[in-house]
Image (tube, rainbow, N blue to C red):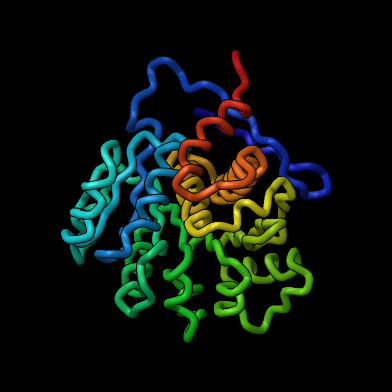
Amino acid sequence: MTFTSNIGGDGTIRRPSLTVPPRDTHKYRRGHAVIISGPPLRTGASRLTAQAALAVGAGLVSIAGECEALREHAAQVNAIMLREMDAGLSVIDDRVMSVAIGPGAGVSDALKATVCRLLARNIPIVIDADAMTSFQDDPQSLFDCLHPQTILTPHEGEFRRLFPDIDLKDRVSAAVAAANRSGAILLLKGPETVVADPHGMFAINRHSSPWLATAGSGDVLTGMICGLLAQGLTAFEAATISAWLHGDIGVKSGPGLTADNMIDQIALVLRDCLIEG
């Protein structure tokens, strides 16, 4: 599939467009995304992330983690591959196009080390949740590792842990300042999600719904971003398009929305973006 972002002159993110992939495409051409699992008994968040990456169009998705965690995943997923992760990160081979880390991972020094090792591979990466909070005592050590195809996805609480001196009163200015400081794409979650790049470009998603305020919703967003990165979109494109698609799920679904049933809604919102030709 080919996605095209649509951002208005005022920075508002609008409905993206999606074209049908060529007839001769195959799963590797559509990209391989790897999601780093949480530990045993905390695997649900990373599973939601992996399911969202697959639903948004990545050709292959793998969950990588320790063996006992993978046993839990094996009871829940079929189309997603499971790979045991070693200290050398051999699971991240040349075919891997994107990585996501953080959902359900648990705050720890070990997680910090894994994040830095992944960043050294220079693969497009989404850093979310615990993978950000693990650096709250020394945010600069994270920023020093980041590369331009990194996306940070904080809600306001996580933002304050990494950027305690940046005032959130003006969320656009705050996101731009944080992106500039970190050197990454910054997606600041909220009723109006702001995406900013280190050079001052920004976009705002106003197409959203309060029904998205449910446990696991952010993990789904992270998976959608990772799935689009796997398909070759830039970090800014993947973040802005995912923000709109995620918002559209909330708008269309309404009351009763949970993260589990968000996965099935991804195909529906993609269909509305499809351009036949």
Image position, residue 31 (x, y; %): 38, 37
Is residue 248 placed above or below 114 in the rendered structure? above
Left or right: residue 223 versus residue 257 is: left
Question: Toward the viewer: 198 or 73?
Answer: 73
Identified at 73% across, 78% down, the residue is 167
Image position, residue 8 (x, y; %): 79, 42
Left or right: residue 154 versus residue 36 is: right
Looking at this view, name the residue that lies furthest to the bottom. 137
Is residue 122 placed above or below 238 in the rendered structure? below
Identified at 72% across, 74% down, the residue is 168
Looking at this view, name the residue that lies furthest to the front. 256
Q: Answer yes or no: is residue 19 visible.
A: yes
Q: Quadrant of residue 194?
A: bottom right
Q: Quadrant of residue 270?
A: top right
Left or right: residue 180 versus residue 217 is: right
Image position, residue 32 (x, y; %): 35, 41
Left or right: residue 276 versus residue 126 is: right
Which quarter shows the C terminus? top right
Q: Quadrant of residue 177?
A: bottom right
Q: Answer yes or no: is residue 94 visible.
A: no
Is residue 112 placed above or below 148 in the rendered structure? below
Question: Toward the viewer: 225 or 235?
Answer: 225
Image position, residue 185 (x, y; %): 58, 59
Identified at 60% across, 24% down, the residue is 274
Identified at 26% across, 54% down, the residue is 64
Question: Toward the viewer: 104 or 147?
Answer: 104
